[in-house]
């Protein structure tokens, strides 16, 4: 994996987004850090090496791979993140926890948005007439929301959430097609298989995902990253969907600003026509 640029986002997010690229030894370091959040802040390079059962050189490469100068640089950033987490009361109610988790998901996603990549994705959305959105399961719901948002500003797109129909649609794509593939893990086989066919046909691929490297991103021309930790037992959680919807909102708002006059005309027309359906 290529060395990442210097990171300004939270260390836990950086590790989560890159864990698909970790070697067996790097996974040992990653798991040790997760299980020893507080004590790892007081470790030396030698201590974390011995505790995780990995050579010092491997530990050092692990942190440099993530974009840090070394273990001390990582500890400084991790200490700042960890102290911020402690500010939340351990006695908070489940209502407060849900609210805090949703706010955190949006804030973390905001922190890793690459504006240049976002602008390029908006330009692709503007330039392509044939736009198809792929999503399966919970991501399919997000895909349908994106279709609704774009429809309200005059952009006609198709959403395909059935895996078989996705492959059928992908088989007829050309270089004039833009595919927006939504997958939190980037490892959903149905999505990856469909995108592989689309890529083979010459389509341009934009991936909305949570991981820097995944089977999906191998086919992507542009990757927009969100940030929301999700365990296999929490698959499809609303918190994760909030992070996806944040990216979708950025894309749709960017497109609206790019085509402001036409978008305003369409929104006005929709408002007039839907008003007739209200008593």
Image (tube, rainbow, N blue to C red):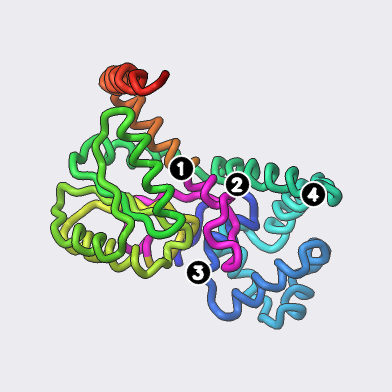
Comparing marks 2 and 4, which lies closer to the viewer? 2
Q: Report how far apart the C-alphas of labels 1 and 4 lie in the structure.
A: 27 Å
Q: x, y percentage for residue 48?
A: 75, 73
- Quadrant where the N terminus sits is bottom left
CB-based contact (under 8 Å), mark 1 and mark 2:
no
* Residue bearing the label numbered 4: 83
* Residue bearing the label numbered 1: 247
Earlier-in-chain disc, 1 versus 4: 4
Number of residues whose C-alpha sits closer than 10 Å to that of mark 1, classed few (under 14), some (14–19) or many (20 or more): many
* Residue bearing the label numbered 3: 20
Q: x, y percentage for residue 190?
A: 34, 67
The disc placed on residue 105 is 2
Earlier-in-chain disc, 3 versus 1: 3
Q: Is residue 11 left or right of 137 when viewed as pictured?
A: right
Q: Nearer the viewer, residue 257 or 153?
A: 153
Vertical side of 139 occupied by 263: above or below: above
Residue ID at (33%, 56%): 161
CB-based contact (under 8 Å), mark 1 and mark 4:
no
Q: Nearer the viewer, residue 82 or 161?
A: 161
At mark 4, the secondary structure is helix
Earlier-in-chain disc, 4 versus 3: 3
Q: Is residue 127 left or right of 84 when viewed as pictured?
A: left
Comparing marks 3 and 1, which lies closer to the viewer? 1
Q: Report how far apart the C-alphas of labels 1 and 2 lie in the structure.
A: 11 Å
Q: For the magenta stretch, what is the residue range?
A: 216-244
- Residue 153: quarter of image: top left
CB-based contact (under 8 Å), mark 2 and mark 4:
no
Earlier-in-chain disc, 1 versus 2: 2
Q: x, y percentage for residue 168?
A: 19, 62
């Amino acid at each position: 994996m290529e060395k990442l640029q210097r990171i300004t986002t939270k260390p836990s997010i950086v590790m989560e987004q890159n864990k698909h690229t970790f070697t067996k030894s790097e996974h040992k370091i990653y798991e040790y850090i997760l299980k020893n959040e507080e004590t790892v802040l007081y470790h030396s390079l030698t201590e974390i090496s011995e505790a995780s059962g990995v050579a010092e050189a491997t530990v050092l490469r692990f942190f440099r791979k993530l974009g840090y100068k070394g273990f001390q640089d990582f500890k400084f950033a991790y200490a700042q993140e960890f102290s911020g987490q402690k500010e939340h009361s351990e006695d908070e109610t489940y209502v407060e926890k849900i609210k805090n988790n949703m706010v955190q998901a949006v804030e973390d996603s905001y922190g890793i948005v690459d504006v240049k990549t976002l602008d390029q994705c908006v330009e692709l959305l503007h330039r392509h007439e044939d736009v198809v959105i792929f999503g399966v399961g919970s991501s399919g719901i997000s895909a349908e929301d994106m279709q609704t948002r774009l429809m309200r500003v005059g952009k006609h797109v198709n959403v395909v959430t059935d895996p078989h129909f996705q492959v059928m649609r992908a088989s007829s794509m050309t270089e004039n097609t833009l595919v927006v593939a939504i997958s939190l893990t980037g490892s959903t086989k149905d999505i990856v298989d469909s995108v592989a066919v689309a890529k083979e046909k010459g389509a341009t691929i934009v991936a909305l995902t949570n991981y820097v490297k995944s089977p999906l991103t191998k086919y992507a021309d542009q990757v927009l990253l969100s940030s929301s930790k999700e365990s296999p037992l929490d698959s499809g959680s609303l918190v994760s969907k909030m992070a996806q919807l944040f990216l979708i909102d950025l894309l749709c708002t960017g497109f609206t600003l790019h085509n402001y006059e036409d978008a305003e005309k369409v929104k006005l027309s929709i408002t007039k026509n839907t008003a007739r359906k209200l008593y």
